[in-house]
Image (cartoon, rainbow, N blue to C red):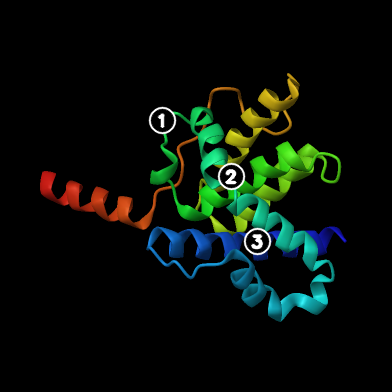
Amino acid sequence: MASNRHLGRIIVLQSLYEYEFRTKAGDETADIDLIVAKDIEPYAKALGDTEFVYGLARDVSGRFAELDEILQPMAPEWPLDTIAAVDRNILRMGLHELQASAETVPPKVAINEAVELAKAFGSENSSKFVNGVLGTAYRQIYGDPAKPSSAEPGALPEPPKTKEQNVQKEAKTEVEA
C-alpha cells in the first residue's frame, strides 16, 4: 500500500498543479474532482485506493489560502507566490498531512514523502527547501525538539529558482557586463 500511496501523492501533485494554474488563469470550469479523474485514469488499476487521492486533492485544494498563511512565516524570506508552483503544492500537501492525517500517516512519513516528491519533480534545491520548511512545521505542530530531518532550525536553504527568475538573473548579468 505504501507504494500505492506514493503514486497517489504524485497524482495529487499533478492535479493540484493543474488546478492552481487554471484557477489563477481565471478558468471557472476548473474542478479538482474532474482534474483528478483525468489524472488518475491511467493508474486506477495500479493505485487501488482512489479515495485517498480524491480526498487529499479535495482537502488541500480547499485549503490553499489557509495552508499558505501557515506556511509563509516558516519561510519569511521567500514569499510563496515567488517559489515554483510544484514546490508550493508539495509544501501544501506536506503541511496538510502533518496537520490532518497524523493518525493514518506518521508525521515523519509525511515529510519524507514530500521530500521525495521534491526530489522527483522539483529543481536542484527543492528537496532541501521542502525539508527545512516542513521540519519547522513539524516542530511547531508537535513541539518536538528532535529534528525529523536534516534541517537546522531557522536555516532554510534558498528555494529553487523558477525559469523566469533564472532568465532575469542572466539578463541582469549581461547588462552589468
Q: Nearer the viewer, residue 138 or 29?
A: 29
> Secondary structure beneath disc 3?
helix
For label 1, the residue is: 77
Identity of the residue drawn at 50% across and 27% down: 73
The answer to whether residue 144 is left or right of residue 11 is right
**Circles 1 and 3 in contact, beta carbons < 8 Å:** no
**Circles 2 and 1 in contact, beta carbons < 8 Å:** no
Identity of the residue drawn at 81% across and 75% down: 46
Identity of the residue drawn at 67% across and 32% down: 150
Q: CA distance from mark 1 to mark 3?
A: 27 Å
Q: CA distance from mark 2 to mark 1?
A: 16 Å
For label 3, the residue is: 12
The crowding category of the residue bearing disc 3, from other C-alpha atoms within 10 Å (few below 14, some 14 to 19, many at least 20), is: many
Question: Which of disc 3 and disc 1 is earlier in sequence?
Answer: 3
Amino acid tagged 2: Leu
The answer to whether residue 142 is left or right of residue 15 is right
The crowding category of the residue bearing disc 1, from other C-alpha atoms within 10 Å (few below 14, some 14 to 19, many at least 20), is: few
Question: Which of disc 1 and disc 2 is earlier in sequence?
Answer: 1
For the N terminus, the image quarter is bottom right
Above or below — where is 66 with respect to 24?
above
For label 2, the residue is: 91
